[in-house]
């Protein structure tokens, strides 16, 4: 007799790709339990977007950004 997890997996895999993607989004969201931390990250992202929009902070190309990250975090 298959386990509950195996039975659930088989049922999920029988869903359409769109429904599996929706379910995956919901499952991932359910793991983001720290609402306060998420709100703080949203505020940081909003502030940085405003800095870019206002010209206070210049935008960097993806190549420059990746090179900076690779230099900072080698390997």
Image (cartoon, rainbow, N blue to C red):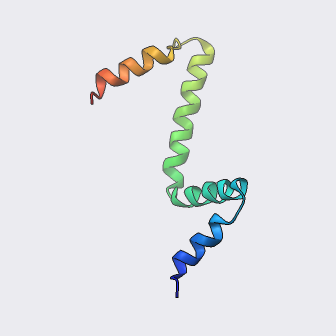
Residue at the far bottom: name it: 1
The answer to whether 70 appears left or right of 18 in the picture is left
Where's residue 12, x and y in %? 64, 67
- As rendered, which of 7 and 49 lies closer to the eye? 7
The residue sitting at 55% across, 46% down in the picture is: 39
Where's residue 42, x and y in %? 56, 39
Decide: is 48 above or below 15: above
- As rendered, which of 9 and 33 lies closer to the eye? 9
Number of numbered markers? 0
The residue sitting at 27% across, 30% down in the picture is: 75
Residue at the far front: name it: 1
The residue sitting at 30% across, 24% down in the picture is: 72
Where's residue 65, x and y in %? 44, 19
Decide: is 23 above or below 75: below
Decide: is 18 above or below 49: below
- As rendered, which of 17 and 67 lies closer to the eye? 17
The answer to whether 54 appears left or right of 15 in the picture is left
Decide: is 46 above or below 57: below
The residue sitting at 65% across, 72% down in the picture is: 11
Where's residue 52, x and y in %? 57, 18
Residue at the far left: name it: 75
């Amino acid at each position: 007799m298959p386990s509950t997890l195996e039975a659930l997996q088989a049922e999920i895999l029988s869903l359409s790709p769109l429904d599996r993607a929706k379910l995956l989004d919901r499952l991932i969201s359910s793991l983001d339990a720290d609402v306060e931390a998420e709100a703080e990250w949203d505020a940081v992202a909003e502030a940085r977007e405003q800095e870019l929009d206002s010209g206070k902070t210049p935008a960097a190309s993806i190549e420059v950004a990746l090179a900076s990250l690779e230099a900072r975090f080698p390997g």
